[in-house]
Image (cartoon, rainbow, N blue to C red):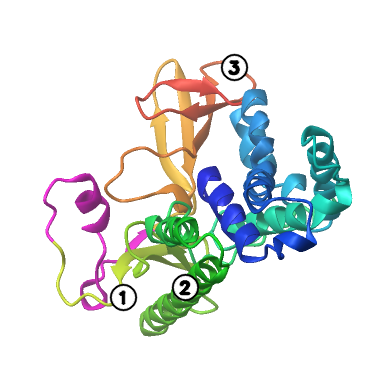
Amino acid sequence: MDTLTHALSGALLARATAPDPARTRITTAARMVAGALAAAFPDADFFLAYVSPVAYLTGHRGVTHSILVLPLWAFLLAWCLSKLVRGRNTTWRDWIGVCALGVGAHIVGDLITSFGTMIYAPLSDARVAWSTTFIIDLWFSGIIVAGLVASSVFRRSRAPAIAGLAVLAGYVGLQAFAHSRAIDFGAEHARRAGFRAAEVSAIPRPVSPFNWMVVVTEGDRYHYANVNLVREVSPPDTGGFISRLDAPYVPLARAKWVADYPALYRVDRGNPSTCVWFQDLRFVIPGRDANIFRYGLCKEEGAADWQAFRLLDDGSLEPAG
């Protein structure tokens, strides 16, 4: 999930859980700001991008996103806020609850996407992904914004924020149901194709909660199709940005399955170097040429070692060490 949506979700959660002003030394506005800051905090690991692209891709959503280390992050953030906010004589105990909620909201917000989050770091680098929600979901973000706007109109009531969270939970529930349907569709394709011991996964796609990339892994090959679960006719591509992203997702009856080798993008054989390029299907989005995950190994003619590079959208290479 993008950092802005994380921050807004933290603010909405902070408002929904705000106690009676008479029972706290923190104003509702300050609590919402704290919730937003805490919910944005785990993405502080963006600094890994300055180390190297590979370091970012392998380390992002690591220890700052861990449920095991969450109490430590909540305490540190609460202590900092108690020192920064003057004039109300607060301590870290006044802030730690909302900080824990904010960090927790961020972790859950990343869990529902398909990239994977190391929630058990540093004890384990296993990535957990529920794969219900695309990483930038305008419907998801819009529900949060609507809840915050309503809260600004009805300032004395928590009801708008609570209602916003309830609608948000219902929306993610709808996406989870759609994910299950997409998995069933892939399993049916595997059965009809006669694949043995096939693994089926479904990756949420942009624009609609019903747009999915369904992937069937069979041996050392994968088969994938871009489908919309509820359409009866394919939408036209009018040339607009949203239309380009939405048009490739066809009705289930018109699904086109593509077979390929896992992760292999292409092989460039030439002089003076040969390069083998790989990509991640999670970042392959029809209608969008850019792909942030295309890496490969290149070897100069006569050289003994391969070197790692990132393949940029313009065709140029960037060292990935």
Image quarter (top left, top right, bottom left or bottom right) of the C terminus = top right
Q: Is residue 269 above or below residue 198?
A: above
Label 3 sits on a secondary structure element that is loop
Query: Residue 290, how many percent across, how many down?
Result: 36, 37
Q: Is residue 118 visible?
A: no
The one nearer the camera, 171 or 75, is: 75
The Cα–Cα distance between marks 1 and 3, rounded to whole angstroms, is: 50 Å
Specify the amino acid type for callout 3. Ala
Q: Name the residue that disc number 2 marks.
A: 167
Q: Is residue 111 left or right of residue 237?
A: right
* Amino acid type of the residue that numbered disc 1 sits on in the rendered structure: Leu
Return the residue nearer the eye: 190 or 269: 190
Dividing the picture into quarters, in which one does residue 250 lie? Answer: bottom left
Disc 1 or disc 2, which is closer to the eye? 2
Q: Which residue is labeled 1 in the image?
A: 229
Q: Which residue shows up at 79% across the image and 62% down it?
A: 23
With 103 as the anchor, is 255 left or right in this view?
A: left
User: Disc 3 marks which residue?
Assistant: 303
Residue 41 shows in the view: yes
User: Which secondary structure lies at badge 1?
Assistant: loop
Name the residue type under label 2: Val
Dot 2: what SS? helix
Magenta-span inclusion, residue 319: no
For the record, the magenta segment spans 236-259
Q: Tell me, yes or no, whether the highlighted magenta stretch contains residue 239.
A: yes
| CA distance separating discs 1 and 2 | 21 Å
